[in-house]
Each structure stands twice: as C-alpha cells, then as structure tokens.
Amino acid sequence: MAEIVRMPKLSDTMTEGTVAAWHKKVGDKVKSGELLAEIETDKATMEFESYVDGILLHIGVEQGKTVAVDALLAVFGKEGEDISSLLSGEAAPAATEVTQQAPAAPVKEEKPVAKPEPQTAKPAQQIVASSAPKPVNDGRMKVSPLAKKLAEDKGLPLEYIPGSGDGGRIVKRDVDAFVAGAVATTASQVEQFHEEPVTQMRKTIARRLAESKFSAPHFYLTMEVNMGRAVEARAAINAAKGTKVSFNDMVIKATSVALKQHPKVNSSWLGDTIRYNQHVHMGVAVAVDEGLLVPVVRFADTKSLSQINAEVKQFVEKAKSKKLQPSDWEGNTFTISNLGMFGIEEFTAIINPPDACILAVGAIREVPVVKDGQVVAGHTMKLTLSCDHRVVDGASGAAFLQTLKSMLEEPTLMFM
C-alpha cells in the first residue's frame, strides 16, 4: 500500500521547508536510510533520509519550492500502483498550505529598469531639456544638407550641436557624435536593482528578533574596559602555546566565569516562571551570507581558551557551509555578539530568546589613558549589555559588568 512522506520538522522553530535538492527521481527504488533530499530549514540545509522502503511514485514538492511542515513531500509504493485517489485526497490541504506559505520565487536576473518616458521624447532631447546647456551656435548656422535632414528626423536642435567642418559647418559626423553623447548620458542615469526571495533563515531571524524586540522590554548598560593586560596576556599565551587564541575567546571565557557569579543574568523568562541556569551554555553569534546563526559552546566556563577557540572555529566553518545541526544551536543561556573585528566601537544587540541578556562587544582601540597620573597609550574596549527588564534589573546587570570588567582587566582572575 502506498505511503505518504511529509515535509519533516527538522528544527524546533521550523514552520516551512524548501527542497534544495532531490537525490532520487520518480521510479527509483529507495531503501530506508538512503539519502532522499536536501531540505533548507530556517537555520541550515540538512540531509533528509528516507524512512520507508519502496518505489518513489510521486514527488510533491519541486526542487527550489517551499511548503509548510507536514505538507506532502513524496509518495512511495509498489511499481505501477495507482495513487490517484491518495493524491486527490491530499490536494485540498496541500493547496491551502502552499497558499499560506508562498513558494520562493526564482532569483531575478539583474536588469536595468528605466522609468518610462513619454513616447515622443528622444534621448538627445531629454539631455538638452534636463541639463539646460547653452547654445553653441548663435545666429546664422552653416549646416550640410545631410546633417540638417538627420537632425530634423531625430528632432535635434541645431543650435546645440557644435560643428567640426570648415568654418564651423555642422556635418553628419557632428550629428552622430551628439546623438552618441546623449545616449551615453542617458544610459549612465538608468535606475537598476534586482530582487531575491527571502530565505527560510532570514524569515526566522526577522520573526524571532521582532518578537524579542517588541515583547521583551530592553534596556542597555555600557561599560569601558581597559584591555592593556588582556593584550599582553594574549600575546604571552600565543607565544607560549603556539595556539592562536583570539580576544573573542578571552571574552567568552571571562563572560562565562562571570555568569557563574551572577545567575540572575544567566537566566530565561518562561512566562509564569524565571529559570536561573546554573550551567553556562554560551551562544556565539556567527555571521553568514543569509543572516546570523548562534551556535552554542556548552559549559563554556569549564573549558580552556584553546578548547573554546577550536569549538568556535569549527562552528564558523559549519555555519558557512550550512552543516550546523540542531544540537549545535539549541540550549543557549547567554549570547555574545562581537563586531569588534569589523571596526565597530560600540553597538546594542537584540536579545536572543530565551536568554534574558546579550553582550555586544566592540573593537579594541588604542587611545590615551591616564595611568598613575600620567597620560599614556592604552587599549580600551566597550561592552554593552542588553537586558530583559522582566528578569534583570539595572543593579544586577551593572554588577555583572563590573565582575566581567575586572576579569578582562586582570585576566588571571578568569582562571581562578
């Protein structure tokens, strides 16, 4: 008997999926466990294995198309089996699903799009009218008969066309040159754009961040940190170990240790309850072409700088190749977003649910600082903590930042 395979829910936030590629075609014999298709979810492109044996009798979603979770994906059965009644029974619900979740449109090729002009307007006339040039010929003009006829046919005012013939006589080449210049100027002023369909990842980012921004009352706390000791410590660690530890790794480690001392900041709003997490699962924002992914470094406070560095590097590679799995991005208790490597000195980040806070990390800047009453060269960095005021009060957030500041300004404290 024929069996329907439906669009699976491959992540906790997935509501629809796009078939990125089919690895089987109608008529193929498929065994359970064989790769059937690649499906783009809201966070990654994942391989989907068949869980039934049989002949692939029908493909319900074309490659590149998007449908809702539980919509008909494929039908398996015996060779030659009649599935028309099965498909007709699915037709109405499937149509409703697709109507609610419109399929992704193909990417449009970039084409110049010009605003429509009146039919009677010619390029040369448009240039003369828009740029309002001064006439180059006053009074009586010398014009060859051919040039005069060409100008009349094209509707060109002869007083604007400079002549290159004997005595300033306007000849055919002058009319041709004037037309070519007008067309070139018009082409350079054509408006251009292209459109692309919104990816599943971008749709989810838009929905989740909008929910966070407009449902959680955000407030922000900013603190400047003297990074002089951290700069020295990083140089010493990299020289001694031969491992390239980044400043971001140090921020992750110091933040994780500080969170153990401030469980109110390492918490989640659950509606009727607030969860105060005793463990630290650090979400690390990673930018990819389609948006932002947040893989999780688990028990980050217990890991060394080199372990954190290796995990984050692996996450970045998997994120850019769309190989992250649900286990990689679920369970965060706090999130760090670092734009310092892009030269951003200070910014505010939107809280990543279900976290109660997110830390925005700016660039390390070399600036004048006062040390022992003297102005000397130093390194500073700004941290901005976004807090959900339903969970975290200003004093709690400030106390956490003070602890984090002390650990970054004296890095040995994060290892005690």
Image (cartoon, grey):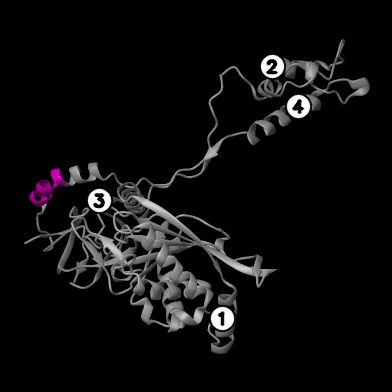
First-in-chain label (4 vs 1): 4
Q: Residue furthest top?
A: 139
- Which residue lies under the disc numbered 1? 233
Q: Tell me what residue is drawn at x 53 percent, y 57 percent.
A: 346
Residue situated in front as seen by the camera: 213 or 265: 265
Front label number (2 vs 1): 1
In the displayed structure, 271 sits above or below 46; it is above
User: Residue 291: which quarter of the image?
Assistant: bottom left
Most common SS among magenta residues: helix
Residue 178's disc number: 4
The residue under the point 51% across, 44% down is 110
Disc 2 residue crowd, few under 14, some 14–19, many 20+, Cα 10 Å: some
Give the magenta range: 84-93
Q: Amino acid at mark 1?
A: Ala
Q: Which residue is mark 3?
A: 67
Distance in Å between CA atoms under marks 4 and 1: 68 Å
Tell me whether the residue at label 2 lies in contact with that at label 4, contact meaning CB atoms closer than 8 angstroms: no
Position of residue 184 in the picture relative to residue 169 (left or right): left
Q: Which residue is mark 2?
A: 155
Residue type at numbered disc 4 = Phe
Q: Residues within 10 Å of mark 3 (few under 14, many from 20)?
A: many
Tell me the number on the disc at residue 263.
Answer: none
Whether 196 is drawn above or below 143: the answer is below
| Disc 4 element | helix
Q: Earlier in the sequence, mark 3 or mark 2?
A: 3
First in residue order: circle 3 vs circle 4? 3
